Image: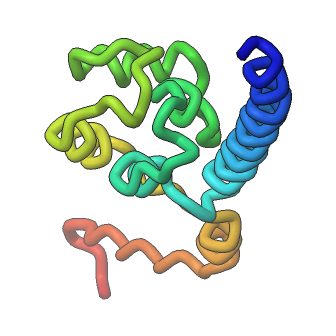
Amino acid sequence: MNASARTDRGPQHLKALQRANEVRLARAALKRRVASGEVSAADVILACPAEVEGMAVSDLLMSQRRWGRTRCRKFLATFPLAENKPIGTLTDRQRRAVAEELPVPTTLSSHATERTAPRAAAPAPVLAGAAV
């Protein structure tokens, strides 16, 4: 009986390692997509794909541009959530509350169009007694 148990552990261990690597790579790719603005953190929290179920909320939030540990802590302090809380254990109400409060990411292309778009001229102030 011990011999069969030993032979089963090897392949099971390798399968677990392979699955862990797949999840790790999927999370890294997702974090890159969130950082680039391609996907919003709110969408990830609401959808909760299988690879992020065990991921801490703070890890996802900090993958956003300009989000560090301090901003993440302050944001999560508004909700009764620990920063190491796994995304998969959030209740539906918590998911919706966090997603509603997260800012909508702006992509690089929208920043470029804002910079190049001409600004509307401010109306000239009307001075008392000035001829128009």
Task: Name which quarter of the figure residue 39 lies in.
Answer: bottom right
- The reply, left or right, for residue 36 in relation to residue 62 is right
Q: Residue furthest bottom?
A: 132
Residue 2, compared with residue 52, is above or below; it is above
Residue 12 placed where, x, y %? 74, 32
Q: Nearer the viewer, residue 121 or 35?
A: 35
Colouring style = rainbow
Q: Residue furthest left?
A: 93
- Measuring 61% from the left and 80% from the top, which residue is drawn there? 117
- Measuring 84% from the left and 26% from the top, which residue is drawn there? 7
Residue 19 placed where, x, y %? 72, 41
Residue 77 placed where, x, y %? 30, 14
For the image shown, how many numbered marks are present on the structure? Answer: 0
- The reply, left or right, for residue 77 in relation to residue 71 is left
- Measuring 50% from the left and 48% from the top, which residue is drawn there? 50
Q: Quadrant of the C terminus?
A: bottom left
Task: Name which quarter of the figure residue 98 lies in.
Answer: top left
Residue 131, compared with residue 27, is above or below; it is below
- The reply, left or right, for residue 51 in relation to residue 15 is left
Residue 128 placed where, x, y %? 20, 67
Q: Quadrant of the N terminus?
A: top right
Residue 86, compared with residue 115, is above or below; it is above
Q: Residue furthest front?
A: 1
- The reply, left or right, for residue 35 in relation to residue 71 is right
- Measuring 60% from the left and 71% from the top, which residue is drawn there? 110
Q: Nearer the viewer, residue 19 or 39?
A: 19
Q: Nearer the viewer, residue 66 or 89?
A: 89
